[in-house]
């Protein structure tokens, strides 16, 4: 017996188009189906997790990525903080950015969101997301600007990388 197989009583054959929720979806843009403020983590993210047998991309990375992308999408930085203060958001040339007056390693999740994950893990995850093109990080004056990287932009648009 294979794992993850439904029992014969649970198994059903579903014909394409037989449910109201799957009619015509192929002709619609995924972004049109998603509620405003939501993000999509495509199957590519699952592939990255599967391929990372060495721990270089883990659930912590996915969680931090989700918080960053949700914060950018909703222009709401309230889930993030630094030891010296808040993280803010701003728009530059139509693109949302998170702005912190700290080093990338000092950006943390607020206590209720962070749970038992240490702040060092958050900083390491942010470094890995930057290295892999999921976020951009730029120092402008004293401000650190965090934005969507090229890979996150392609995920947002639903394109393959």
Image (cartoon, rainbow, N blue to C red):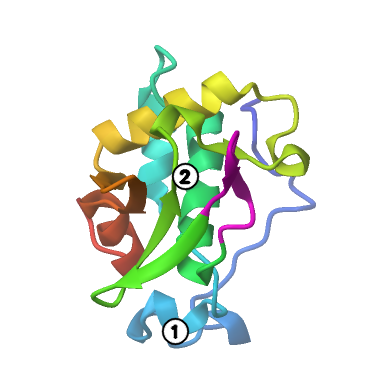
**Residue under the point 23% across and 75% down:** 93
- Closest to the camera, between mark 2 and mark 1, is 2
SS category of the residue bearing label 2 = helix
Left or right: 61, with 93 as reference point: right
Task: Please state which of residues 154 and 76 is positioned toward the viewer in this rendering.
Answer: 76
Q: Which residue is mark 2?
A: 65
Picture coordinates of residue 72, whole percent (x, y) = 45, 62
Magenta includes 82?
A: yes
Sequence-wise, the earlier of marks 2 and 1 is 1
Q: Quadrant of the N terminus?
A: top right
Task: Please state which of residues 116 and 8 is positioned toward the viewer in this rendering.
Answer: 116
**Residue under the point 29% across and 44% down:** 137
Highlighted magenta segment, given as a residue range: 77-87
Q: Residue furthest front?
A: 141
Report the number of numbered marks: 2
Task: Please state which of residues 45 and 129 is positioned toward the viewer in this rendering.
Answer: 129
Q: Where 158 sits versus 127, above or below? A: below
Q: Residues within 10 Å of mark 2 (few under 14, many from 20)?
A: many
SS category of the residue bearing label 1 = helix
Image disc number at residue 135 = none
Q: Which residue is mark 1?
A: 32
**Residue under the point 37% across and 37% down:** 47
Cα gap from disc 2 to disc 1, whole angstroms: 22 Å
Q: Where 10 sits versus 102, above or below? A: below
Picture coordinates of residue 64, whole percent (x, y) = 52, 40
Task: Please state which of residues 10 and 33 is positioned toward the viewer in this rendering.
Answer: 33
């Amino acid at each position: 017996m294979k794992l993850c197989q439904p029992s014969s009583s649970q198994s059903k054959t579903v014909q394409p188009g037989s449910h109201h929720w799957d009619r015509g979806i192929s002709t619609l843009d995924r972004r049109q189906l998603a509620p405003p403020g939501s993000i999509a983590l495509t199957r590519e993210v699952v592939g990255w997790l599967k391929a990372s047998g060495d721990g270089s991309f883990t659930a912590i990375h996915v969680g931090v990525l989700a918080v960053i992308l949700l914060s950018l999408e909703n222009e709401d930085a309230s889930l993030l903080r630094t030891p010296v203060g808040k993280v803010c958001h701003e728009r530059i040339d139509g693109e949302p950015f998170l702005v912190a007056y700290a080093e990338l390693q000092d950006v943390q999740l607020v206590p209720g969101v962070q749970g038992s994950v240490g702040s060092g893990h958050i900083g390491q995850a942010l470094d890995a997301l930057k290295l892999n093109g999921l976020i951009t990080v730029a120092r402008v004056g004293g401000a650190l600007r965090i934005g969507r990287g090229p890979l996150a932009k392609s995920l947002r648009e639903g394109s393959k990388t």
